[in-house]
């Protein structure tokens, strides 16, 4: 059972465009949603996160939009740069100390110069 | 500052051979520790977590075992490797973030395992 789904599997945008990565989840107990960025051959690194009490979180060029009713969220990367080319993972957790972060299948983003 | 070191960086092993991977966390006392597995081009699957020395909880069964012999050390092992064990193994530690009221995971650089 895939509890966290991501789309598209891969995405190509031009430099300067806004990349939109989508994520949805099934478990209503999830209330913490971090996004991780992973470059080839490296471990993932936390990019930005949101709690379910918020509907938007911004950090520079990165913005998460969250819709609790529809159990959907999206990561918007504004003014995309070639250095943003990486795989992005949406994850979910029930912040009550489950110690189990569930990851989606990832979106591979390519930013063309 | 906290640092996480995984070893080895890469391994090529034969089916049926034993395996031991490790990670060490410095700069954080009594960290929560985790092992994740990632197939090539795939998602991250949590394997084990440990809240304290000597105690390890299994999340999925993949014919692997884990141990925490020291506060800052986490070991992943098996006596007999399978082809399906190939992939990228990531150790992680977590820090409670008072801002988000959630555990934030920090990953090591991983070990690439190839089973032939």
Image (cartoon, helix red, strand yellow):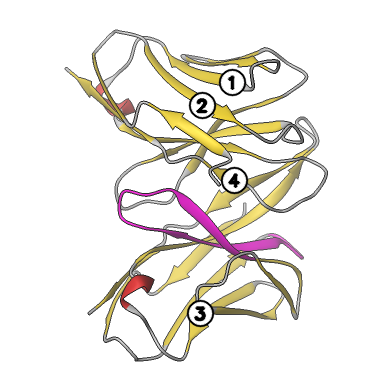
CA gap, disc 3 and disc 1: 35 Å
Label pair 2/3, CB-CB below 8 angstroms = no
* Marks 3, 1 in one chain: no
Q: Which residue is mark 2?
A: A23
Q: Position of residue B6 (x, y in %)?
A: 46, 68
Label pair 2/1, CB-CB below 8 angstroms = yes
Q: Which residue is mark 1?
A: A72
Secondary structure beneath label 2: strand
Position of A95 with respect to A108 (left or right) is right
Q: Which residue is mark 4?
A: A102
Q: Position of residue B51 (x, y in %)?
A: 76, 65
Task: Chain letter for mark 3, please.
Answer: B
The disc at residue B63 is 3
CA gap, disc 1 and disc 4: 15 Å
Task: Chain letter for mark 2, please.
Answer: A
CA gap, disc 2 and disc 3: 31 Å
């Amino acid at each position: 059972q895939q509890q966290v789904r991501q789309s598209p599997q891969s995405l190509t945008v031009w430099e300067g465009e806004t990349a939109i990565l989508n994520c949805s989840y099934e478990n209503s107990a999830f209330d913490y949603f971090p996004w991780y960025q992973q470059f080839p051959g490296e471990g993932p690194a936390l990019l930005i996160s949101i709690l379910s009490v918020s509907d938007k979180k911004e950090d520079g060029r990165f913005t998460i939009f969250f819709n609790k009713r529809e159990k959907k969220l999206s990561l918007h990367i504004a003014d995309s740069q070639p250095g943003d080319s990486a795989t992005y993972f949406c994850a979910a957790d029930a912040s009550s100390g489950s110690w189990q972060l569930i990851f989606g299948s990832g979106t591979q983003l390519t930013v063309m110069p | 500052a906290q640092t996480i070191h995984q070893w080895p960086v890469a391994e090529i092993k034969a089916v049926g051979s034993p395996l031991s991977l490790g990670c060490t966390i410095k700069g954080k006392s009594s960290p929560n520790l985790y092992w994740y597995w990632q197939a090539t081009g795939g998602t991250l699957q949590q394997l084990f977590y440990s809240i304290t020395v000597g105690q390890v909880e299994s999340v999925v069964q993949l014919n692997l075992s884990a141990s925490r012999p020291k506060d800052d050390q986490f070991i992943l092992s098996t006596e007999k490797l399978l082809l399906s064990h190939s992939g990228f193994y990531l150790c992680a530690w977590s820090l409670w973030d008072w801002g988000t009221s959630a555990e934030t995971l920090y990953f090591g650089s991983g070990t690439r395992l190839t089973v032939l």
